[in-house]
Image (tube, rainbow, N blue to C red):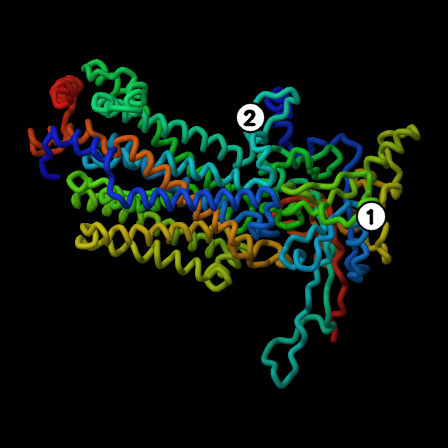
Amino acid sequence: MKDIEWSRINKDVLESLQSPRPLFWVVIAICVLVVLVGVGAEKYQYDNGLGVALMNRPHYWQLYISNFVFWIGMSHSGTLLSAILLLTKADWRKPIYRFAEAMTLFSILTAALFPIIHLGRIWDLYWVMPYPNERTIWPNFRSPLLWDAAAITTYATSSALFLYVGMIPDMAICRDNATGWRKPLYTALSLGWMGRAREWMAFRKTYVIVACFLVPLAVSVHSIVASDFAMSIVPDWHITSFPPYFVAGALYSGCAAIITLFVMLRYLFRFEAYMTEEIMEKIAKLTFAIALVWNFLNLGEYVSIWYSNDMFEKEVLIQKFIGPYAPVVWGMLICAMIAPFAMAFQKVRRSMWGMFWLSIVLQLGMWLERFQIVSPPLASNHEPWTWSVVWPGTIQLTITAASFAWFTMLFLLFCKVFPSISMYEVKEMAFHRRREGLHDEVENIHDIQEEIIKTERGLT
Amino acid sequence: MGLRRMLENWSDLRKRDYYENEPYMWGMAIDLDKCTGCGACVTACYVENNLPVVGKEKFASGYAMHWMRIEHYWTEPDDSPEIGQKEPSDHPERGAHFIPMMCQQCNHAPCEPVCPVAATYHTPDGLNAQVYNRCVGSRYCGNNCPFKVRYFNFFDFWKDLPEPLEQQLNPDLSVRSKGIMEKCTFCVQRIRAGKDHAEDEGHPHSVEDGTIVTACQQTCPTQAIVFGNLKDKSSRVHQLWADHQVKLNRHEQDKPEDVRGYRVFEELNVEPSVMYMDRVRDTEI
């Protein structure tokens, strides 16, 4: 990244809150419209029963569950990018981690909708949570769905906290510059931040602690989502390697989503100076590495099923490749297994719109992957008498489309109200690069303290 | 499950033979040699258990609610010599093989641990119970059932019941609304009535064999279905299980090849309570 003038950083980022490109409003309008249509579809399903979604026996689970896994997966790389890269002191994360964290929060909020939409009796949803009641009835702690409910709520809370904690210094900058309705909002959220050295010390500690908490949590959350499948006895769901496979898949699709949003924000909010090609190249490399891990685990899964020689599992595996869902499986393999190799070329990695379309392809591949995890094993289960093939109907597809719109809407509104680039961290990065021309190499706490005080002068 | 009970008895509840001292353990034996595939049991089940008749289209789309179904399996016809390089079939007779399939009331039921709200659980008398009022409709149990004998109310089927027909509903059990899972209960309403009757007569822990009859058993014209208490050594079902050397725990089973008794998907260790007796076929041509 080239040097950015400190005075420009505040101005640029704060401007993004005021005047995005006109396309921003068009996207928001489309999203609101699609969400409304989705709400209509859900109302119809609520009134008439889940049959209208065209699930049947044995396809008790379908698109809602695969969407759930997809969105949970997407939420993972936000944490990866901000927490893991924070702990490993990779400073290229600084201009992009804020929106990645926001992506985490909003995709988990989208994911949380799906188990609700999926339930037969939504109105009794709260029974899944352990709450004291006069009948002393508790949920079943052995059920992976209960672990899910616990994991999702924990993860949503912690990632919201992480996002918020990381935003406090920026809230103060916004507060100092805001007028109108934004002023009281930022004042409340900045918690009286004055930028004193002591505040920075406490802030740094808190931030690292939350990051340390979040990393294992993220891994456990997707492992729990994987146990929804791995703990069952359905052939090709009951696979030991599912938890790491799901975590790798989550990071993979999440990184692809970061690339998509990266290009989108760069254009909509005019962040060309901040979201540079160098950063894109680094994310692309990261995505490529994760894609290879995922590929390995995917192939490992096939091999372990094949050599297990279990009659039922082998049948499902064969049906995946030649059966009715074969187009989905092959589509997945092309989009998620072969397409990422394009990132081996630097020309692709450094091209913004090339990476944009590639990331869409990768996400499509990973979305199909979730569908082929859920549906084909149900279609050719243990009991041959019940074998049947069902494709998701209009209602399921509408609600799926609405979930994408819902996510985009929340995300873009967030970027409109809150700074989607971390101003203080970018300043820090610019400061260090100018002074040392190197990465952030601060080793001990006294140095950090000194740095903080110096950096503070850059703040308004 | 109360919290205290859960914490204190957690390991006990998971132990094999936790209900060992209970007087009842309901089980079934179905003789496939006697089954003609007439479907009378299915009809009886519809009538007894207030099952909705969903109509041709919904049946074809997989919304059928038949707790009991007759599965047909067809022997491949022998290929005629001019076409046939294929091996001739093992069985010269052509036509369908039938197997009545209903909830097997597994003793290691895969549906039970996965329910988030514990709407399905094991009763002390060996039934795999489904609590309609507790069910939230996550449908995990339906996926995890290897027999696929759990039926989900995808619609409010009772709304389609034409005017006078609600009079024929069985008042002994409820009519289910949309969004919940249901399945064969071994006619639990009849079991409860039978046990109450025995208690009234002064022998609360021993229901006489044959006094409790499930709807399918009652209707079967060839008497292929036998139902009873597996813990009662004099009951017919116990006799049949013993004759065919089928044991609840398949690892204790040491059964010779030529014995007809088997349980479906035994190898999954789900311990079904329904034993089938294989159809004897003439393998000589």
Closer mark to the observer between disc 2 and disc 1: 1
Kind of residue sitting beneath label 2: Pro
Residue A286, placed above or below residue A166: below
Q: Which mark is residue A130?
A: 2
Front-most of A102 and B19?
A102
Q: Position of residue A148 (x, y in %)?
A: 49, 35
Identify the image quadrant of the C terminus of chain A.
top left
Q: Quadrant of residue A328?
A: bottom left
**Please, what secondary structure does the residue beneath circle 1 have?**
helix
Instruction: Give the residue displayed 61% in from the left and 45% down from the top.
Output: A49
Instruction: Give coordinates of residue B190: x percent, y percent.
Output: 83, 40
Q: Please say whether residue B243 is visible from this viewpoint.
A: yes
Disc 2 versus disc 1: distance between alpha carbons?
43 Å
Residue B159 or residue B129, whichever sits in front: B159
Disc 1 marks which amino acid? Pro
Q: Is residue A241 visible?
A: no
For label 1, the residue is B164
